[in-house]
Amino acid sequence: MRTYEVLFILSPQVPEEEATALVTEFRGVVEKLGATMKNEEAWGRRRLAYPIHKFNEGVYHLFVVETAERDALRDFLTERGIQTGIHYPIPIHLQEAYSDLGLGPGAFPHAERLARETLSLPMYPELTEEQIRGVTDAIREFFALGRPH
């Protein structure tokens, strides 16, 4: 069983009555998850850090595909009302925060390729089977038009 630590911090500017309500709501969410809270008293009411025990499966939040035709596929899906995302467009080594490392383009070619070629498809709990079929049918249609795989 995995342990996740959740840090819940309330600003001192939050009025006491509102802070109490927020902490109560947080506890309710944890209980609905079937999780347990530890060290509640040690942190006080304005800064609560809990290891939460329960989850033994991964949480899927992205469904990512790779294609050299990422931008064309994205445009094609957008024209059909299907939203997509590009979550990691710049590899870490090319971000300004890491410029002092002196790692330019070509230092990590696989990361750079993935930054150019990955596309996140719709993924959320309310997605219906019909909507999933709509996404997959549109992707099939895109590649059937003679674009490279």
Image (cartoon, grey):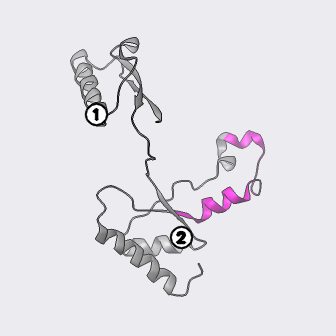
Above or below residue 30? Residue 147 is below
Q: Residue at x 59, y 78 (%)?
A: 149
| Whether residue 81 is visible | no
Position in image of residue 137 (x %, y %): 40, 78
Circle 2 or circle 1, nearest the eye: 1
What secondary structure is found at the residue carrying circle 2?
A: helix
Above or below residue 54? Residue 120 is below
Position in image of residue 84 (x %, y %): 43, 63
Above or below residue 9? Residue 94 is below
Which residue is under mark 2?
Answer: 71
* Amino acid found under the numbered disc labelled 1: Val
Residue 136 — which label? Answer: none
The boundaries of the magenta stretch are 98-119
> Left of 83 or right of it: where is 146?
right
Which residue is under mark 1?
Answer: 29
Asked if residue 125 is among those painted magenta in the image, a careful observer would answer no
